[in-house]
Amino acid sequence: MTEYRASFDAAIAFSNGGDLTVHGFRVDLPGPDTSEADIATLFVASLGLLMTDTVKLTNVRIFSEPHKGTRGGPSEPRHTRQPASGDGRGRLVELNHLPQEGGTYLEAPGGDLAAVELVKAVDLPAVVVRVTGARRSPIGVGSLAPFDVRGHAVLLHTGVREGHCLAAGAAAWLVEHGAVLVGTDADGLDDCAREARPAREALLGAGVPVVERLTGLERLPPTGALFTAAPPRLLGVGRVPVRAYARLPLT
């Protein structure tokens, strides 16, 4: 079977300031028809670049060549669920607002909390995506690509109640890459000033529960914690306050 790679130049801007330029970089590709947008995502993932805002590629060339094992690329082994570091019996951290503070809510796919399986709400290995300090703009694929999200709860640490919504394309990327739950410390995943809710609809439509208005995400490591936000089994109820918490890994 023929394998393919790409060579390109790239200019990257970061949402918290700064930029990076590379020339003649190469990544493994899943096939010869890989789009430039997907090549940019593979590039960000290969370097583990955090808080990437924009990536512009030039001089893109796709050619047949055996894969070299690009991190996050098609030849890297994939797992349905990554174990947390340590034995998972570390300290518990509260992640929910009290009711008088507005509460923390879980929304169920299909508007039915009774259908949320425990494997999608309990002891999920967590990935904490930090965009604190970045300019307030939609969180795109560039902020997510450095992380292996498959089988994980993806928790967006924005540090603000509004202004850091999740881009619709980023929500689709999370679905495609196997995230099992998505949470945020903001009031909502989408722009609260607009009626449309494309990110939430994309996730719920794919069976991914959404947790909004979390707190305490600054106390979690980027990876290694176990996240829980199990809702009551209420038939025909789609959204409910939850007591969310995380178990830190032993150090």
Image (spheres, helix red, strand yellow):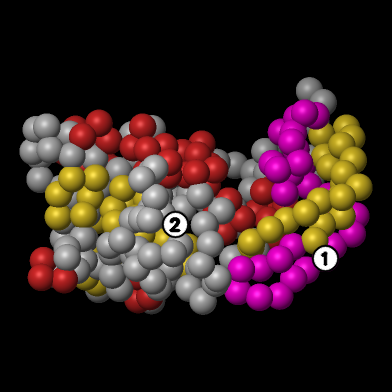
Residue at point 39%, 42% (across, down): 196
Q: Nearer the viewer, residue 198 or 56?
A: 198
Q: Secondary structure at mark 2?
A: loop
Mark 2 or 1: the one toward you: 2
Name the residue tied to disc 2.
Answer: 165
Q: Is residue 211 left or right of residue 26?
A: left
Mark 1: amino acid: Thr
Q: Is residue 154 above or below residue 80?
A: below
Find residue 212 and report its horizontal and vertical position in percent: 29, 56
Magenta highlight range = 12-40
Residue in the picture at 25% in, 31% down: 110
Q: Which residue is mark 1?
A: 21
Q: Which of the 4 quarters of the picture holds residue 64?
A: top right
Between the C-alphas of marks 2 and 1, the distance is 27 Å
Residue 110 highlighted magenta (yes or no):
no
| Residue 182's disc number | none
Query: Residue 239: x percent and y percent?
Result: 18, 45
Instruction: Please tell me which of labels 2 and 1 falls first in the chain.
Output: 1
Secondary-structure class at tag 1: strand
Q: Is residue 90 visible?
A: no
Q: Percent position (x, y) of residue 75?
A: 68, 39
Residue type for callout 2: Cys
Would you say residue 39 sits in the magenta stretch?
yes
The quadrant in which residue 214 appears is bottom left
